[in-house]
Image (cartoon, rainbow, N blue to C red):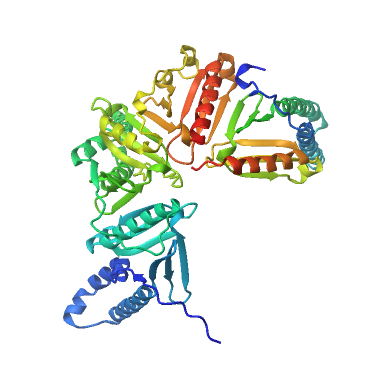
Amino acid sequence: MNELFAPPGTDWQPVSPALARLRRALVLVAAVGLLVVLVVATLLFSLPWGLWLPVVAVLLGVVVWGWVLVGRNARSWGYAEREEELYVKHGALFRRLVVVPYGRMQYVDVQAGPLEQAYKVASVHLHTASPGTSARIPGLPAAEAARLRDRLTALGQSQAAGL
Amino acid sequence: MTRQQPAERPFKRLSPLTPLVRSFILVVAGVASFWDDILRGEFGPLAWIVLAMLVAGAVYGTASWLRTKYWIEADELRVDTGIVSRQSRRIRVDRLQGVDIVQPFVARMFGLAELKMDVAGGGSGEGSLAFLSLGDAQDLREVLLSRRDAVRAGLAPERPEEPEGPPQPEQVVARLDLGTLLLGLLLSPETVVFAVLLAVLGGIFIGFGEIGGIAAVVPVLGGFALTQMRKLTAYYDFTVLTTPNGLQVRRGLFERSTQTVTLPRVQGVVVTEPLMWRSFGWAKLDVAVAGTGGSDGDGGPSASTVMPVADRAVVMALARTLLEASGSPDPDAVALSPPPPRAKWVAPVGRRFLAVGIDDHLVVSRRGVLSRRTHVVPHARVQSLQVHQGPVQRRLSLADVRVDSPPGPVAVLARHRDAHEARALLDLENAAARTARSV
């Protein structure tokens, strides 16, 4: 890990491995969906089955590529709670590090869509008065998300700074 | 069943001329179109209809005026309106971000003004009183702002007070003369880009012998002229004053507007120096104020502008005044450093104009080829910090450092710094912001 994205004193907390599983499931579902469309199209318009080899090869390539990419991205997420700030880093290709002081926090969102609920994860989103602040942590285990939300809210209240 | 009637309050009404001003255009149009008939005393059926509409409008307007009352009660400005369905709006004085006075053209002819209240998180139509006499509007603004400060300081007086004694001293700190404004608009980047574009297009048309093609350019020319005219009328007689409530901006040819910048709410400033202005030593100053995140990016006049064009020294003096809450630091005193030479691979032209610097009070960044913009944010107003690094930047060991501010014109961004320096910059600014917050 390079120095630019080094952890601020404490180690980076990784997100749940369920995030990678969830996104890989999405990749597979999309690939299978596309395959079904292709089969239907082939049957309906009686296309030659010879088209299949390159199409399936490309699809397989995309799935493998997506698989690797999702894994790299999920591993890239990390957060660290310090005394006065929350640090969040993510991105494998385009890397980002965000530092949000608890005192600047306006509110905290915890979101879990149906798919996320199935994988028992949630995302925590920290908002400041600036719309540019992109402090979002996806794929937290549900209990950890709730703990983080409560801790952030408490710290935000005790350290609140005026605009 | 008796309903408890509230005790009589010392309410006030809007100016009785309000209905006339609101429907002035209609009245004038109605009278003008049937002027001949009126003179001859012969009313056609159409004239009667218009007359009836005017009378109905007058009755409605008068009723509406009678029903509209405002008064200050406890820590609220209360506004009751409505004829059929009644509305009662309460605006808490301690929630006021600022109070602006606007004088649309017609209102100005009658010496009237509209009072616009900026409420945190409120829409534009939230708090507005139209119309008051200019004197009343100014008095009410003073009362509202001083009560707000009193409430915020925890010294709320028992009951509303009328302003006592002579009005607070106001001092003009900068005034824009017409010549500078005209030359400034003429030499603005928009005009220069437009002139070049026009010359190229004209050259092409003439070169191909299609003189008639120039006609296609006319509407574009008209649109551009209109934008510049809007700026000219909006920035006309631009005056900046210091008042007890902050820095006040008065501007406008037809529509006069008065805006007060509450100094403790200033989030940062931007000094813009277009290429063509630099030989004159001119600059433009914009301010970001919390709660007034203006995104009016149509190239027209902007409410965030505190000085459209002035000598750099004047602009910097104004900037120091605006940064008063942070101890009036001088943005020019911050030592700026450019990114490393290898940044030329990602920013071949812009690299020479990029710079960033941090001192005890401020974080400053500069960028822009045609228009050099210096963004200034006090440490105490930093929201959050970010480091970004794309794949090309990673190969060159470069990174961007961003300072997040509330919505507005200010965005400190240090592009293409050395990666080691970028992280050091982030940690340094973070420490500075932490210290500034805890003060």
Residue A34 or B132: which is nearer the viewer?
Answer: B132
Q: Is residue A29 left or right of residue B88?
A: right
Image height of B231 relative to B154, above or below: above
- Residue B400 seen from this side: yes
**Could you tell me which residue is drawn at 35 percent across and 33 percent down?**
B328
Of residues B258 and A24, the one drawn nearer to the viewer in this rendering: B258
Task: Give the quarter of the figure containing the N terminus of chain B.
Answer: bottom right
Q: Residue at x 19, y 75 (%)?
A: B36
Residue B116 lies in quadrant: bottom left
Furthest residue in direction top, as rendered:
B341
Q: Is residue A72 above or below residue B182?
A: above
| Left-right relation of B254 to A106 | left
Q: Position of residue B161 (x, y in %)?
A: 34, 63
* Residue under the image location 24 percent in, 49 percent down: B169
Q: Position of residue B407 (x, y in %)?
A: 48, 41
Residue B371 shows in this picture: no
Rendering coords of residue B343 (x, y %): 48, 16
Q: Which residue in the rendered view is the most extreme toward the bottom?
A: B1
Q: Nearer the viewer, residue B369 or A75?
A: A75
Q: Does residue B422 appear left or right of residue B66 in this picture?
A: right
Locate residue A140 relative to residue B130 in the image: left or right.
right
Please give the name of the residue rendered at 30% of the width and 31% of the height, measured from the top-left corner: B316
Q: Position of residue A89 (x, y in %)?
A: 64, 28
Which image quarter: residue B215? top left
